[in-house]
Each structure stands twice: as C-alpha cells, then as structure tokens.
Amino acid sequence: MRTFSHGAPVVRLCGCWICIVCLGCFPAVTQQNAAMAPSPASASVPNGAANRLITLDVAVTNPSGQPIPGLQQQDFMVLDDKQPQKIASFQAAETSTATAEPPAEVILVLDQVNTSYQHVTTSRQEVEKFLSQNSGEFPWPVSIVFFTDSGAAETTPTRDARTLLKDLKENQHPLPNAKRAQGVYGAVDRLNLSVRTLGQLANYEAKRPGRKIVIWISPGWSLLSTPRIDLTTKDQQGLFSSIVGLSDDLRRARITLYNVDPRGSGSVTRDYYKDFIKPVTAARQVRGGELGLQVLAYQSGGLVLNSGNDLAAEIATCAADASSFYVLSFEAAAADAPTEYHALDVKVDKPDVKVRTRSGYYAQPQP
C-alpha cells in the first residue's frame, strides 16, 4: 500500500487573515514504511514543445448520460481560445476493444478529513455496495485511497472486487479527531491537507501512463470565502500560483476528478461552488474558492454529484467514464506571456451529444 507523507504547512492564519507560505509545493508519494521526510517539491512544468503537446481525455454521451462509442477523428473539432487546432493524435479507448493505450484506472478516495463520522460510515457502506455489485472482476484497475488526518494510503490497483472488499474491511474507519481545530482555523488546516494530498496523488500518477478517474467521496473542503477571510495581494499571488501548479499537475497526470457528496440531497450549499468555476487568468481575480474540490472537478472535465442519495449508483456513473472515452492531442502555440490561460472546447459533429473534457490550461512562452 502506498502512503502519502504530509510536508510543510501550506497556509497560516494571522488573526482572521490568510498568509500564503508554499501552496503548490507537493511532496511525492512514498512507499509504505519508507522514510517519511518530505521529498523535493515537484518541478514547474517545463517550457518548450514538450509542454505544448496537450492531451485531452474526452467523454461523449447522449442526453441520458450513456457513452457514445464508434466516433472517428473527423467527428471532432478542438478549439484553443476559440481557434481550431490540428489534431495530432486520436484514439477511441473502449474496454471492449484491445488498444495500445493503457487501460484507464479508477481511484476511489474515501475522505475522512472533510466528512462527518456519520457520513464516512455511509460512504464506506456505499463503496462496499458498489464493489459488491460487480460480478467479481472490473473491466479496469481500481484502487482505494484512505484519506485521514494522519495521512493518506492507497491500495494496490486491482480488477478483483474481492480483494478491494478485503482492503476496505482491513482499513477500519478511524474515530473522529477530537483535537481537530474548529472554525476558520480548522477549515484552513483541512484545505491544506486536502489540496496537498491531491497534489501528491497527481505527482505520483504523472509518472504512470493512461487516464485516471479519481472519484473523491466528500462534501469537499472550505471555499475560503467568508466575511472573516480577507485576501491580501500577496495571498492572491500565492493562491494563483497554487491554482496554476495544481492545474498543470492534474493535466500532466491525466487525472479527471469527480466529486460524490455523501450528504446527497441534505447538502444545502451544493451549488455554491459554481460561483468559482470561471477560470482565473490573473492573481487579482482570486477570491479563494477556486481551489475547491467541486471547482477542480468541474474544470478537469469530471462530474459533481451532490444531490442524490444513492452513492453507489453515483460512483458507478463516474466510473463508467473509464469504459468509453476518446483521447485527442494537439500542439499548442507558445504563449506570449508567462502563465497565459487558454480556454479549451471540443465539439462533436453529431446531434444531441454532450461533451466533457478539461476546460483549459496555462501555457508558457517559448524559452
């Protein structure tokens, strides 16, 4: 089982103000029982042609949400800042056919940091239900990440549902952390831990080929947008660097992020994240909520499912994206300025289809 070590704190509160220290510096994943000292921070995305080859994982569904297989390259158009791009490579990835592309992986994250004890219990029961509904073998590798206050550990990916059920039962649900800070301080601590863990996961997965469907089962963490939080210019600059770094990390790792909220219809703030999904193109635009779990999921091309009460079915809906999708790449032009945001859009020349993919990326100038 792989474990994630937690490095230096990310943000600190001074009274009711936020002071950014090192958001965006994520240690790599370590092996269980290995030394837990933080590893060097991930390097920034290199400039040049290697960084300009953009790979997109694209889900195409009908109005009912069912995947549409059998599309060809000529059915697709890629727009970068509304400008058509030449598709450099194309592949239809389906579990029913043998392809050179490594199979997509499904990673279930059981968030026991941002979720109440009651809803963690529900989450575990629903994950067990999802695993038990399978006939015994999944069409793609599946792993479980147990995310707690003391760290995070991921099981070995496997297609065997029985092995996953055994892993789930052997990793017991911990008791609530009575020492956890409350209020704004606690919210910031949990955001630190959550964003750092997501970054660690992305850094590890970037070294492995193929698409990763990361299903984060959680209400999410604080959007840092309350009257008690006032961002300084320095805060905004630090958060902007973190937004850019995490966006690059998730893209390079080919992670599509999904959020399943165990509160279901009981969530009274389920649409608040939509206030922050507009891409941030400059530090002065940062308000704090742009690092929210739901925001990151939406921008990666994943789903935000927070209004239903059948978690097992919602997990299955997210995982289904691993069974049929399309992989497109194009070479983007060099940016005119550092950290230049480019909006992405993929259109399909078919009626009544819904297309989901990454909403954009941050480009860099030619060195």
Image: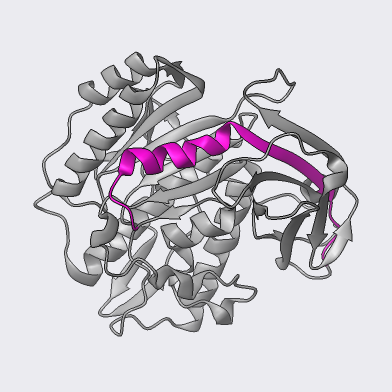
Q: Quadrant of residue 366?
A: bottom right
Q: Residue at x 43, y 30 (%)?
A: 30
Q: Residue at x 91, y 50 (%)?
A: 86
Residue 319 inside the magenta-drawn segment? yes
Foreground residue among 298 and 239: 298
* In the image, residue 288 above or below residue 141: below
* In the image, residue 96 above or below residue 293: above
Residue 138 placement, left or right of 328: left
Q: Residue at x 69, y 30 (%)?
A: 93
Q: Quadrant of residue 294?
A: bottom left
Residue 189 placement, left or right of 329: left
Q: Is any part of residue 334 visible from this angle?
A: yes
Where does residue 342 sit, x and y in percent of width and height? 74, 65
Foreground residue among 161 and 48: 161
Foreground residue among 225 and 122: 122
Foreground residue among 253 and 43: 253
Q: Is any part of residue 24 visible from this angle?
A: no
Residue 112 inside the magenta-drawn segment? no
Image: magenta residue range = 307-335
Q: Residue at x 63, y 34 (%)?
A: 324
Where does residue 102 sit, x and y in percent of width and height? 66, 24
Total numbered labels placed on residues in the image: 0
Where does residue 187 sit, x and y in percent of width and height? 27, 64
Where does residue 331 sit, x and y in percent of width and height? 85, 50
- Report the coloring of the rendering: one colour
Q: Can you say which quadrant of the picture contains the C terminus? A: bottom right
Residue 268 placement, left or right of 83: left
Q: Can you say which quadrant of the picture contains the N terminus? A: top left
